[in-house]
Amino acid sequence: MVGYKTALVTSLGALGLACLLMREPPLPSLEPDPWWGPGRRQPEEDTVRPFKIDIPKEEVADFRTRLSLPLRLTPPLERANFTYGFNSIALAKVVDYWRREYDWREREERLNAFAHYKTRLEGLDIHFLRAKASAQHPKEVKVVPLLLIHGWPGSFVEFYDLLPLLTTPQEGSSVVFEVVCPSIPGYGFSQAPVREGLGIKETGQIFLKLMKRLGFEKFYLQGGDWGSAIATEMATYYPENVMGVHLNMFGSMTAGAIAKLVLGSILPAGFLVAAKDQDKVYPLGETSRWLLSETGYAHIQATKPDTVGGALNQNPVALAAYLLEKFSTWTHKENVFLPDGGLLQEDFPISLDVLLDNVCVYWFTGSITSSMRYYAENLGSRNSAFATENNPCRVPAGLAAFPQEISYTPQSIAAHKFYDIVSYTDQEAGGHFPALERPADLARDLHRFVTAVEARQRMTPA
Ligand SMILES: *[C@@H]1O[C@H](CO)[C@@H](O)[C@H](O)[C@H]1NC(C)=O
């Protein structure tokens, strides 16, 4: 045991030293004007068209027909609850609610409460919504643009309770946000690419063009899940356009960070990883076991998205089971031990209506397969999402660590990627979907971060 540890410490020490001496690699280059749409490249067309969600009535009727088909469920194992995946007794209850209580037209009206638009970028119709900063704010409060990015299995639907807290003045904040919330290509109402290669970097380039088209040369970023990965790439590639990046999911996969994480497991607490973070990170065996048991979907989606996507796109019940399982486990790890995965509990932080809105967006846009292909584009061998891991992100970063997030990254580890962490907060509660689960906490953290960045800019005039 001692021999193995000594060898490990020595080799990791050498690796760490090598990392210190290693020069920063150049950023992988990006084709500046790719064409993702069908057919031949056409001249760029820069109109921004208002868009209303209005699913044709034949499609709503078809949805209802499929939803009303008799269920073919396999009884769950005794006392298994959600430990084998979505429990079929709970699934029947969700479907019952969906059939009897859920009214798409009413929900659609709510989704149209914000102004939606589409515009063509690199051959694709890109959908986004805009939430304007309220006109009523004290004059010392500054309006700042914010690009807010969702992930999988989410959508713009995640942000409806958060947006009003961003666009109106909040106590202690010096800003209100002018929010642009796009759908990732191949998600929701954004068109999917017809050829391979559109990953997080390429999305970042499209979103930068979107912001410029809307007149925003400089802006803030916020994201979780893929939104976080896209925001991180944008902050790394375009520091002159990004004033700050706020993330509610983040990691660091630099060699130095990994060496520190592994070494930290052998060295005394507090030496490399803070004492308060020990339980969240170690033992590594346990955290990786949990990760392994919860991330099989990512492996499938990175390798055979069309197979599963083809099946899920046939029936809304199948789609709901696949997507909503994530909302169970990713809001609280212990939810797998509950018969309904927590989803139907009184105190579940997200209403069933909102959960089903999100499923309906995937359903009506038929986007499950293209949304899953995003894993293949980013995690597949051709286009590694981690290719820029060793390129630091130097713009001001605000990191909000929610305790039930899929993985926890202490500040000292995150600092290997984010060189200018302005705020790092350990949140009291919440998981992977804080905009839905804890909108007030997420809004407060974002306001505080941007207020701090703005104060710093006032102190050091350019
Ligand atoms: C499943 O839920 C039941 C009822 O709450 C509980 O008694 C049982 O221990 C749970 N099973 C697991 C594996 O946690």
Image: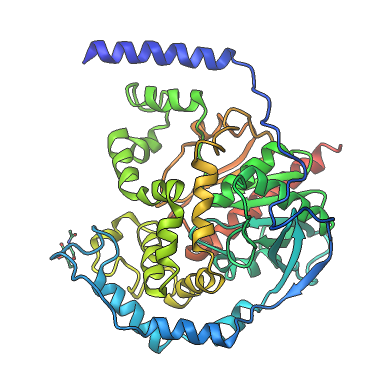
Q: In what quadrant of the picture does the N terminus appear?
A: top left
Write the residue at 82% across / 57% down: 213
Count numbered badges in the picture: 0
- Say which quarter of the image contains residue 24: top right
User: Which of the two residues, 318 or 432, is positioned nearer the viewer here?
Assistant: 318
Q: Nearer the viewer, residue 84 or 42?
A: 42
Q: Position of residue 193 (x, y in %)?
A: 63, 55
Q: Nearer the viewer, residue 188 or 270?
A: 188
Q: Quadrant of residue 344?
A: bottom left
Where is residue 292 shown, x and y percent of the image? 32, 43
The reply to whether residue 430 is visible in this rendering is no
Question: In which quadrant will I find the C terminus?
Answer: top right
Whether residue 159 is situated above or below residue 237 in the rendered picture: below
| Residue drawn at x 42%, y 50% as measured from the top left | 304
Query: Is residue 348 toward the left or the right of residue 337 in the image?
Result: right
Q: Residue 28 location in percent, x, y?
A: 66, 31
As drawn, which residue projects farthest toward the left?
78
Q: Is residue 120 in view from this perspective?
A: yes
**Residue that appears at 35% across and 70% down:** 343
In this rendering, the answer to whether 361 lies above or below 182 is below
Residue at 24 percent of width and 58 percent of height:
84
Q: Is residue 433 left or right of residue 116?
A: left
Question: Which sits in the foreground, 385 or 264?
Answer: 385
The image quadrant in which ligand 1 is located: bottom left
Residue 305 placement (x, y as % from top left): 45, 53
Q: Is residue 431 above or below residue 282?
A: below
On screen, residue 65 versus residue 33, left or right, reads left
